[in-house]
Protein backbone atom coordinates (compact mmCIF):
# COMPACT_ATOMS: atom_id res chain seq x y z
CA UNK A 1 0.00 0.00 0.00
CA UNK A 2 1.35 3.46 -0.91
CA UNK A 3 1.91 6.07 1.79
CA UNK A 4 -1.05 8.48 2.01
CA UNK A 5 -0.26 12.03 0.89
CA UNK A 6 -1.80 15.11 2.50
CA UNK A 7 -1.60 18.67 1.18
CA UNK A 8 -1.37 21.30 3.91
CA UNK A 9 -2.21 24.72 2.50
CA UNK A 10 -0.46 27.40 4.55
CA UNK A 11 2.86 27.35 6.41
CA UNK A 12 1.98 29.46 9.42
CA UNK A 13 2.14 27.84 12.85
CA UNK A 14 -1.20 26.05 12.25
CA UNK A 15 -0.11 24.57 8.94
CA UNK A 16 3.35 23.58 10.15
CA UNK A 17 1.87 21.91 13.24
CA UNK A 18 -0.64 20.10 11.02
CA UNK A 19 2.12 18.90 8.70
CA UNK A 20 4.18 17.70 11.67
CA UNK A 21 1.19 15.71 12.92
CA UNK A 22 0.72 14.24 9.44
CA UNK A 23 4.35 13.14 9.45
CA UNK A 24 4.03 11.60 12.91
CA UNK A 25 0.93 9.77 11.68
CA UNK A 26 2.88 7.94 8.99
CA UNK A 27 1.65 9.94 6.00
CA UNK A 28 3.48 12.26 3.63
CA UNK A 29 2.85 15.98 4.03
CA UNK A 30 3.14 18.51 1.21
CA UNK A 31 3.07 22.04 2.63
CA UNK A 32 2.01 24.68 0.09
CA UNK A 33 2.77 28.28 1.09
CA UNK A 34 2.08 31.31 -1.09
CA UNK A 35 4.70 33.49 0.62
CA UNK A 36 8.46 33.06 0.11
CA UNK A 37 8.91 32.15 3.78
CA UNK A 38 7.29 30.08 6.52
CA UNK A 39 5.85 31.25 9.83
CA UNK A 40 2.89 33.38 8.81
CA UNK A 41 2.45 36.16 11.37
CA UNK A 42 5.21 34.71 13.54
CA UNK A 43 8.11 36.88 12.42
CA UNK A 44 11.32 37.29 14.43
CA UNK A 45 14.22 39.50 13.41
CA UNK A 46 17.58 39.35 15.20
CA UNK A 47 19.56 42.58 14.95
CA UNK A 48 22.70 43.73 16.77
CA UNK A 49 21.91 41.51 19.75
CA UNK A 50 18.22 42.50 19.84
CA UNK A 51 15.32 40.08 19.32
CA UNK A 52 12.48 41.85 17.53
CA UNK A 53 9.04 40.28 17.15
CA UNK A 54 6.71 41.24 14.34
CA UNK A 55 3.87 39.09 15.61
CA UNK A 56 3.15 37.26 18.89
CA UNK A 57 6.01 37.38 21.40
CA UNK A 58 4.97 34.44 23.58
CA UNK A 59 2.23 32.13 24.79
CA UNK A 60 0.43 31.35 28.02
CA UNK A 61 2.60 29.12 30.22
CA UNK A 62 -0.55 27.31 31.40
CA UNK A 63 -1.22 26.00 27.89
CA UNK A 64 0.65 22.79 26.98
CA UNK A 65 0.57 22.81 23.19
CA UNK A 66 3.75 24.77 22.43
CA UNK A 67 5.69 23.03 25.17
CA UNK A 68 4.67 19.58 23.95
CA UNK A 69 5.61 20.52 20.40
CA UNK A 70 8.97 21.88 21.57
CA UNK A 71 9.65 18.59 23.35
CA UNK A 72 8.87 16.59 20.20
CA UNK A 73 11.23 18.81 18.19
CA UNK A 74 13.99 18.58 20.79
CA UNK A 75 14.08 22.31 21.58
CA UNK A 76 12.69 22.32 25.12
CA UNK A 77 15.96 23.88 26.29
CA UNK A 78 15.09 26.96 24.24
CA UNK A 79 11.97 27.74 26.26
CA UNK A 80 12.28 30.82 28.47
CA UNK A 81 9.99 32.15 31.18
CA UNK A 82 8.59 35.62 31.51
CA UNK A 83 10.83 37.63 33.82
CA UNK A 84 8.90 40.81 34.61
CA UNK A 85 5.35 40.77 35.96
CA UNK A 86 2.66 43.40 36.29
CA UNK A 87 1.57 46.23 34.04
CA UNK A 88 0.46 49.87 34.11
CA UNK A 89 -2.10 52.14 32.52
CA UNK A 90 -1.24 55.55 31.08
CA UNK A 91 -4.01 57.91 32.15
CA UNK A 92 -2.77 60.80 30.04
CA UNK A 93 -0.90 62.21 33.03
CA UNK A 94 0.79 59.32 34.78
CA UNK A 95 1.37 55.57 34.85
CA UNK A 96 -0.83 53.77 37.39
CA UNK A 97 -0.34 50.13 38.32
CA UNK A 98 -3.02 47.66 37.20
CA UNK A 99 -4.19 44.51 38.90
CA UNK A 100 -3.57 41.22 37.08
CA UNK A 101 -5.86 40.80 34.09
CA UNK A 102 -6.88 44.46 33.85
CA UNK A 103 -4.55 45.16 30.94
CA UNK A 104 -6.15 42.38 28.88
CA UNK A 105 -9.60 43.76 29.67
CA UNK A 106 -8.61 47.27 28.57
CA UNK A 107 -7.28 45.83 25.30
CA UNK A 108 -10.52 43.93 24.69
CA UNK A 109 -8.93 40.50 25.18
CA UNK A 110 -11.45 38.09 26.66
CA UNK A 111 -11.69 34.39 27.41
CA UNK A 112 -8.47 34.05 29.43
CA UNK A 113 -8.98 32.72 32.94
CA UNK A 114 -7.23 34.40 35.87
CA UNK A 115 -5.45 31.18 36.81
CA UNK A 116 -3.95 31.06 33.31
CA UNK A 117 -2.73 34.64 33.57
CA UNK A 118 -1.31 33.96 37.01
CA UNK A 119 1.09 31.40 35.54
CA UNK A 120 2.44 34.03 33.15
CA UNK A 121 3.84 33.63 29.67
CA UNK A 122 6.68 31.74 28.01
CA UNK A 123 8.62 32.25 24.81
CA UNK A 124 11.73 30.96 23.06
CA UNK A 125 15.33 32.00 23.62
CA UNK A 126 15.81 33.87 20.36
CA UNK A 127 12.20 34.59 19.55
CA UNK A 128 8.98 32.87 18.57
CA UNK A 129 10.39 31.96 15.16
CA UNK A 130 12.47 29.34 17.01
CA UNK A 131 9.45 27.03 16.92
CA UNK A 132 8.40 27.67 13.31
CA UNK A 133 12.01 27.46 12.09
CA UNK A 134 12.42 24.13 13.91
CA UNK A 135 9.21 22.77 12.37
CA UNK A 136 10.22 23.88 8.88
CA UNK A 137 13.68 22.33 9.32
CA UNK A 138 12.25 18.98 10.44
CA UNK A 139 9.73 18.95 7.59
CA UNK A 140 12.48 19.81 5.11
CA UNK A 141 11.68 19.37 1.43
CA UNK A 142 8.00 18.82 2.26
CA UNK A 143 7.63 22.62 2.59
CA UNK A 144 7.17 24.40 -0.74
CA UNK A 145 7.27 28.20 -0.40
CA UNK A 146 6.10 30.58 -3.13
CA UNK A 147 3.59 27.86 -4.04
CA UNK A 148 0.14 29.35 -3.70
CA UNK A 149 -3.00 27.30 -4.37
CA UNK A 150 -5.44 28.51 -7.00
CA UNK A 151 -7.99 25.71 -6.81
CA UNK A 152 -8.80 22.34 -5.30
CA UNK A 153 -10.87 19.80 -7.22
CA UNK A 154 -12.07 16.33 -6.21
CA UNK A 155 -10.18 13.50 -7.88
CA UNK A 156 -10.74 9.75 -7.95
CA UNK A 157 -8.59 9.11 -4.87
CA UNK A 158 -8.70 12.49 -3.15
CA UNK A 159 -7.93 15.91 -4.59
CA UNK A 160 -6.18 17.60 -7.49
CA UNK A 161 -4.54 20.78 -6.14
CA UNK A 162 -3.54 23.40 -8.70
CA UNK A 163 -0.76 25.86 -7.87
CA UNK A 164 -0.10 29.43 -8.98
CA UNK A 165 2.81 28.14 -11.06
CA UNK A 166 0.40 26.11 -13.16
CA UNK A 167 1.66 22.81 -11.80
CA UNK A 168 -0.48 20.53 -9.63
CA UNK A 169 -0.25 17.87 -6.94
CA UNK A 170 -2.54 14.92 -6.37
CA UNK A 171 -3.21 14.04 -2.75
CA UNK A 172 -5.41 11.83 -0.59
CA UNK A 173 -6.48 14.64 1.71
CA UNK A 174 -6.25 18.41 2.25
CA UNK A 175 -5.84 20.63 5.31
CA UNK A 176 -6.64 24.31 4.84
CA UNK A 177 -4.57 26.24 7.40
CA UNK A 178 -5.12 29.62 5.80
CA UNK A 179 -6.96 32.86 6.65
CA UNK A 180 -10.72 32.52 6.72
CA UNK A 181 -11.31 34.39 3.48
CA UNK A 182 -8.89 32.10 1.62
CA UNK A 183 -10.53 28.98 3.04
CA UNK A 184 -13.92 30.41 2.04
CA UNK A 185 -12.79 30.81 -1.58
CA UNK A 186 -11.24 27.35 -1.88
CA UNK A 187 -14.14 25.54 -0.20
CA UNK A 188 -16.74 27.44 -2.20
CA UNK A 189 -14.91 26.18 -5.29
CA UNK A 190 -15.59 22.66 -3.97
CA UNK A 191 -19.29 23.43 -3.86
CA UNK A 192 -19.54 24.03 -0.10
CA UNK A 193 -21.88 27.04 -0.04
CA UNK A 194 -21.77 27.37 3.76
CA UNK A 195 -18.06 28.20 3.51
CA UNK A 196 -19.12 31.73 2.55
CA UNK A 197 -19.91 32.23 6.24
CA UNK A 198 -16.16 32.37 6.85
CA UNK A 199 -16.15 35.75 5.10
CA UNK A 200 -17.88 37.05 8.25
CA UNK A 201 -14.58 36.73 10.13
CA UNK A 202 -13.27 40.31 10.33
CA UNK A 203 -9.52 40.76 10.44
CA UNK A 204 -8.50 43.94 12.25
CA UNK A 205 -5.36 45.80 11.15
CA UNK A 206 -2.34 45.64 13.44
CA UNK A 207 0.61 48.03 13.64
CA UNK A 208 3.59 47.67 15.97
CA UNK A 209 6.87 49.56 16.22
CA UNK A 210 9.93 48.19 18.02
CA UNK A 211 12.40 50.86 19.12
CA UNK A 212 15.92 50.38 20.49
CA UNK A 213 17.54 52.78 22.96
CA UNK A 214 20.65 53.03 25.07
CA UNK A 215 19.92 52.49 28.74
CA UNK A 216 20.75 56.11 29.62
CA UNK A 217 18.09 57.34 27.18
CA UNK A 218 15.38 55.83 29.39
CA UNK A 219 15.46 57.89 32.59
CA UNK A 220 12.69 56.02 34.36
CA UNK A 221 13.15 52.57 35.86
CA UNK A 222 11.06 50.28 33.71
CA UNK A 223 8.90 48.03 35.86
CA UNK A 224 6.59 45.26 34.81
CA UNK A 225 5.91 44.13 31.26
CA UNK A 226 4.63 47.46 29.94
CA UNK A 227 1.54 49.63 29.88
CA UNK A 228 -1.76 50.16 28.10
CA UNK A 229 -3.36 53.52 27.52
CA UNK A 230 -6.71 54.43 29.01
CA UNK A 231 -9.54 54.44 26.44
CA UNK A 232 -10.10 58.15 26.92
CA UNK A 233 -6.45 59.12 26.49
CA UNK A 234 -5.31 60.79 23.28
CA UNK A 235 -2.62 59.54 20.93
CA UNK A 236 -1.92 56.65 18.61
CA UNK A 237 -0.08 54.39 21.08
CA UNK A 238 -2.58 51.96 22.62
CA UNK A 239 -0.04 49.86 24.51
CA UNK A 240 3.67 49.35 24.93
CA UNK A 241 5.65 46.24 25.92
CA UNK A 242 8.97 46.66 27.70
CA UNK A 243 10.36 43.89 25.51
CA UNK A 244 13.82 43.85 27.08
CA UNK A 245 12.19 43.44 30.49
CA UNK A 246 9.59 40.83 29.63
CA UNK A 247 11.85 37.98 28.47
CA UNK A 248 15.59 37.41 28.91
CA UNK A 249 18.01 38.03 26.05
CA UNK A 250 15.86 40.50 24.11
CA UNK A 251 18.47 43.28 24.13
CA UNK A 252 22.23 43.52 24.70
CA UNK A 253 23.59 44.83 27.99
CA UNK A 254 23.19 48.57 28.39
CA UNK A 255 20.26 48.73 25.96
CA UNK A 256 16.48 48.80 26.11
CA UNK A 257 13.92 47.52 23.60
CA UNK A 258 10.35 48.87 23.58
CA UNK A 259 7.48 47.66 21.43
CA UNK A 260 4.60 50.06 20.84
CA UNK A 261 1.18 49.01 19.55
CA UNK A 262 -0.44 51.78 17.51
CA UNK A 263 -3.77 52.62 15.99
CA UNK A 264 -3.05 52.61 12.24
CA UNK A 265 -3.02 56.07 10.75
CA UNK A 266 -1.16 58.49 8.52
CA UNK A 267 2.43 59.53 9.04
CA UNK A 268 5.65 57.80 10.03
CA UNK A 269 4.67 55.15 12.58
CA UNK A 270 8.15 55.06 14.13
CA UNK A 271 8.24 58.83 14.57
CA UNK A 272 4.74 58.85 16.08
CA UNK A 273 5.60 56.02 18.49
CA UNK A 274 8.85 57.68 19.62
CA UNK A 275 7.21 61.08 20.15
CA UNK A 276 4.45 59.62 22.33
CA UNK A 277 6.88 57.44 24.31
CA UNK A 278 8.99 60.54 24.97
CA UNK A 279 5.96 62.09 26.62
CA UNK A 280 5.06 59.00 28.62
CA UNK A 281 8.49 57.67 29.61
CA UNK A 282 10.62 60.81 29.34
CA UNK A 283 12.97 59.34 26.74
CA UNK A 284 15.88 61.45 25.57
CA UNK A 285 17.41 61.53 22.11
CA UNK A 286 16.47 59.55 19.02
CA UNK A 287 16.19 55.77 19.05
CA UNK A 288 19.15 53.74 17.81
CA UNK A 289 16.73 52.34 15.24
CA UNK A 290 13.06 51.49 14.84
CA UNK A 291 11.28 48.68 13.04
CA UNK A 292 7.59 48.83 12.14
CA UNK A 293 5.41 45.82 11.32
CA UNK A 294 2.04 46.42 9.70
CA UNK A 295 -0.55 43.69 9.19
CA UNK A 296 -3.43 44.98 7.09
CA UNK A 297 -5.36 41.89 8.12
CA UNK A 298 -4.14 41.12 11.62
CA UNK A 299 -6.15 39.58 14.43
CA UNK A 300 -9.46 37.90 13.54
CA UNK A 301 -12.70 38.87 15.24
CA UNK A 302 -15.70 36.55 15.11
CA UNK A 303 -19.45 37.01 14.81
CA UNK A 304 -21.61 35.69 17.68
CA UNK A 305 -22.60 32.68 15.54
CA UNK A 306 -19.05 31.85 14.46
CA UNK A 307 -18.60 28.63 16.48
CA UNK A 308 -21.97 27.33 15.29
CA UNK A 309 -21.12 28.09 11.65
CA UNK A 310 -17.73 26.37 11.92
CA UNK A 311 -19.26 23.28 13.53
CA UNK A 312 -21.87 22.99 10.78
CA UNK A 313 -19.24 23.60 8.10
CA UNK A 314 -17.14 20.77 9.49
CA UNK A 315 -20.16 18.48 9.42
CA UNK A 316 -20.67 19.30 5.74
CA UNK A 317 -17.01 18.66 4.95
CA UNK A 318 -17.45 15.02 6.01
CA UNK A 319 -19.44 14.52 2.77
CA UNK A 320 -16.31 15.27 0.72
CA UNK A 321 -13.06 13.36 0.38
CA UNK A 322 -10.85 14.00 3.46
CA UNK A 323 -10.55 17.75 4.00
CA UNK A 324 -10.28 19.85 7.17
CA UNK A 325 -9.95 23.49 8.18
CA UNK A 326 -7.61 24.92 10.81
CA UNK A 327 -6.06 28.10 12.12
CA UNK A 328 -6.84 31.42 13.71
CA UNK A 329 -9.70 32.11 11.33
CA UNK A 330 -11.73 29.21 12.73
CA UNK A 331 -10.45 28.14 16.16
CA UNK A 332 -8.98 31.18 17.93
CA UNK A 333 -6.07 33.54 17.40
CA UNK A 334 -3.70 32.46 20.19
CA UNK A 335 -0.54 30.59 19.21
CA UNK A 336 -1.49 27.61 21.35
CA UNK A 337 -4.98 27.54 19.82
CA UNK A 338 -3.42 27.52 16.35
CA UNK A 339 -1.15 24.58 17.19
CA UNK A 340 -4.07 22.67 18.69
CA UNK A 341 -6.27 23.45 15.68
CA UNK A 342 -3.65 22.32 13.16
CA UNK A 343 -2.92 19.06 14.92
CA UNK A 344 -6.60 18.22 15.36
CA UNK A 345 -7.25 18.91 11.68
CA UNK A 346 -4.41 16.55 10.78
CA UNK A 347 -5.83 13.82 13.00
CA UNK A 348 -9.22 14.26 11.36
CA UNK A 349 -7.81 13.85 7.87
CA UNK A 350 -5.50 10.98 8.86
CA UNK A 351 -8.36 9.19 10.52
CA UNK A 352 -10.48 9.45 7.39
CA UNK A 353 -7.81 8.20 5.00
CA UNK A 354 -6.85 5.36 7.34
CA UNK A 355 -3.28 6.41 8.19
CA UNK A 356 -1.79 5.13 11.44
CA UNK A 357 -2.23 7.66 14.20
CA UNK A 358 0.45 8.09 16.92
CA UNK A 359 -0.24 6.25 20.18
Image: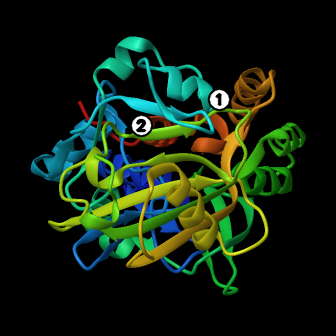
Rendered-image quadrant of the C terminus: top left
- 69 left or right of 99 in image: left
Residue depicted at 70% across the width and 86% down the height = 166
Per the rendering, the mark at residue 336 is 2
Relative to 354, say whether 8 is above or below. Answer: below
Q: Quadrant of residue 198?
A: top right
Q: Nearer the viewer, residue 295 or 183?
A: 295
C-alpha gap between disc 2 and disc 1: 19 Å
Q: Contact (CB < 8 A) between labels 2 and 1?
A: no
Where residue 174 sits: x, y (%)?
58, 53
For this orientation, the residue located farthest to the bottom is 165
Q: Can I make out residue 354 in this image?
A: no
Front disc: 2 or 1: 1
Relative to 359, say whether 9 is above or below. Answer: below
Relative to 336, say whether 263 is above or below. Answer: below
- 314 left or right of 346 in image: right
**Secondary structure under the numbered disc 2 in the rendered image:** helix
Where residue 113 sits: x, y (%)?
45, 14
Which comes sooner in the sequence, label 2 or label 1? 1
- 17 left or right of 15 in image: left
Residue depicted at 46% across the width and 65% down the height = 210
Q: Nearer the viewer, residue 166 or 137?
A: 137
* Residue at the disc numbered 1: 108
- How busy is the neighbourhood of tag 1: few (under 14 within 10 Å), some, or many (20 plus)? few
Q: Nearer the viewer, residue 145 or 21?
A: 145
Residue depicted at 32% across the width and 44% down the height = 25
Where residue 94 sits: x, y (%)?
52, 36
Amino acid sequence: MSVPRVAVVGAGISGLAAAWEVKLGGAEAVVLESEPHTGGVIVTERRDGFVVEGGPDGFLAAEPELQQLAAELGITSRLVDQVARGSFVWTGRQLDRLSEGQAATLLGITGIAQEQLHKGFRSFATGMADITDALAARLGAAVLCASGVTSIAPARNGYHVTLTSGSAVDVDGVILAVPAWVAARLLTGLGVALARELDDVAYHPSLTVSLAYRQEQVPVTLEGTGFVTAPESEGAVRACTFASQKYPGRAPAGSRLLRAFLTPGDGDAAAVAHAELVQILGLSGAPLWARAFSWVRGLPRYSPDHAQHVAELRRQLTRLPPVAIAGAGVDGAGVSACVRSGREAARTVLGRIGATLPA
